[in-house]
Structure formats: C-alpha cells, structure tokens
Image (cartoon, grey):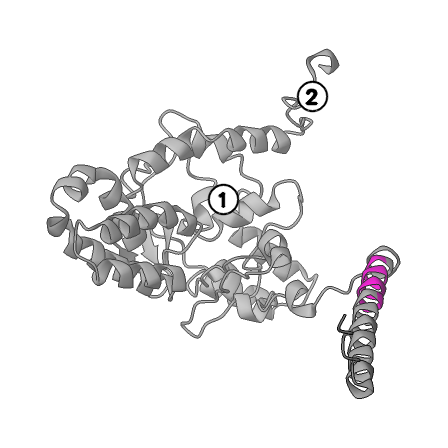
Amino acid sequence: MNQPSPVPRSRSWVRTILVRLYTLSIMLIVVWTSYTAVAYLFGSVFTPTVVPPELLTWAGELNTDTLRANDGTTRRVQPPRAPVGHYHGVDRWFQPDRHNNCTTVGCHEPLPHTKRKEVRAFANLHATFLDCRTCHDANISGPVGVHWISTVTGREQETPALLRLMNELETAGDTIQNAPAEIHPTILEQLRAVIVGIGGDSALENLLVRIDTSQPGSPVWRQAVARLETELPNYTRGDYSAKIALRAPPEDLNEPTRRYLAAAPDSPEREKLNQSIHKSVISRPDACLTCHGDDPPRLDLAALGYPPSQVAALLSAPTVRLIQRTIEGEPFYLPRILEPDDAR
C-alpha cells in the first residue's frame, strides 16, 4: 500500500502560524467588543451625558435693544433641527414695530406682558400682530373699526399677503382642482409677496421653487400647493409686517412722553405726566372673550382678511375660554380622559 507523502516542515509551520493569528484576531475582537459594551453600559449608567452646546444654545437675542431694532430688518431664527431645540427653542422671532411709541421710547418692553406667568405667553403672542391700543384703550367697547398698519411705514395698508394667499387657497379649491393654470400666476405672485413680508424663509422659498418649476396641475405642483396650504397657518403669529390697529387716529404722546422721560424719577411732575399719558389706558383688559367669543366679536376678522377656517377657529377656540377662566382665578384642571373610569 502506498503511504501518503509527509508534509514539508516549512508548510506545517506556516499553517500553524496562520491558525494562531486567526485565533488571536478572533480573541482580540471578542475582548474589544466586550470592553466597548461594558464601557458604554458603565458610562451610560454612571457618567452623566454632556449635551453638546449647539443643542442647548439659541442664536436669538432677547436683549431689549435687539427687540427694539430700528434698522429696518426683521429678527428671525430658522427652526433648529436638534430635538432639544425642537421642544424648547423658539422656532421664529417676531418682527420689530418701529412705530409703536409705547416701546420705542423706552417705557415698555417689546414683550410687555411679564407679570402673570399663567397668561403672559398668550398676551405677548398678540403683541406681535395687535397694536397696544386695540386692547388697552379704555374708550372702546363692543365692535370697533380696525385696519392693518404697516410696521415698516406706520401707515395703513391692505390685507397682508399671507392672509390673501391663505384665503385664495381656501376659497379657490375648485379652480385649483379643475383649472390650475388659471390660479398658478396668482399663487406665485402672492407667495413671493409673503416671503418678502416675512423677511425670507427657507421652507416657503423651497415651495416657491417647486411650484414655479413644475407644470400646473401636475402631481408635483399639486403636492407643493397642498403643502403650502398646510404650512401657511404656522406663520400667522405675527409674520405680516403689519399690525391690527384702531381706525381712530391715536393721540400724539411724543411730547408728553419726552417730558416724562426728562423729569426726575419719583418727582411730582413725572407722576402727573404718567397719569396724563395713561388716562385712557386699561392696564389689564378683560379682552379674551370679547374677540374670541362675543357675538358680534370686537374685531371683524373676515373684514381684516382672515380666511373662513381661521375665523371659525379664532371665534370658537376652547383654549381662549380656558385662559379666560385662568385670568379670573379659577383653578386649572387637566383633562382626565386617560384615567380609568373607576378613578373619575
């Protein structure tokens, strides 16, 4: 019988070295993986995580000089993409009003409502699109005549482009569906005006490009228009470059305000001027339901250009009634719909 030929010693050593190197690499991988897993577990349990500064800091400026900006620019911050910024940041800033004497002279802050933490956020929200006298004038009651005034020029203007476009999209559904080419130029014109009034916005600019470069009535066009209709209500918190103001001409308070600021603090003259300036001012107006619940409401929202859906929402907002009860000192109760029936 033939015997197998012996393997050369050199090849045997090579095979042994390769096997051992392979075994060593497997052991190193297992050890490194185990170490990494244990280190990660230990670190996540016993070592506090350091949140990156860019997730916590906000680039906006809250100092008074910035809020009283008189350089013709708008102050806004693009929405942060980080989770912390999403839930705790301010997604857009409001536009400065360079013709609001209450704030520009230095007497009141641009966000003037600070005393009551329960309602100050809601009150300051209204300060972005309502002139102070609209709520704080003691001479008004019931429905009042109002109009839009430009925060850039201080003069009366037409309904802001944002509301005109929202109205167009809401009331022209049949045209958008059956004759998109007819409404296409109007959408582009008004959307461009919206972007100019806002001071630039990447989301709306992207939609403008998509609508402008697609065939009216095509799937891309319809998708972009539908997205635009969904996005626009997010900008109704004051991105108008305008405010709602009383039609009655305001009293010129520049001269008494100048003398008030020039008078010595705590002097009788300053106190007298302060009373004269605020003689027709309601310090704490009870105005929530007068605009959002009364029939007729204080403001004619439809005449101001708000689309029908917005008018209906503003006149029946349940949050307003909740805030009104909070203002009146009633306790705030969380809904109990998630509690079991036996706990109610």
Residue 136's disc number: 1
* Quadrant hosting residue 309: top left
Which quadrant, please, contains the N terminus?
Answer: bottom right
Q: Residue at x 70, y 17 (%)?
A: 340
Q: Position of residue 344 (x, y in %)?
A: 71, 14
Q: Mark 1 is on which residue type?
A: His
Mark yes or no: residue 247 visible: no
Left or right relative to 86: residue 313 = left
- Bounds of the magenta segment: 31-41
Q: Position of residue 244 (x, y in %)?
A: 37, 49
- Choose mark 1 or mark 2, whichever is in front: 2
Left or right relative to 261: residue 20 = right
Magenta residue check for 219? no
The one nearer the camera, 274 or 303, is 303
Q: Position of residue 301 (x, y in %)?
A: 33, 38
Q: Which residue is mark 2?
A: 339
Mark yes or no: residue 6 visible: yes
Q: Mark 2 is on which residue type?
A: Glu
Q: Secondary structure at mark 2?
A: loop
Q: Residue at x 73, y 11 (%)?
A: 342
Would you place residue 129 above or below residue 332 in this image? below
Q: Earlier in the sequence, mark 1 or mark 2?
A: 1
Residue occupying the far bottom of the picture? 10
Left or right relative to 245: residue 6 = right
Magenta residue check for 36? yes
The one nearer the camera, 307 or 188, is 188
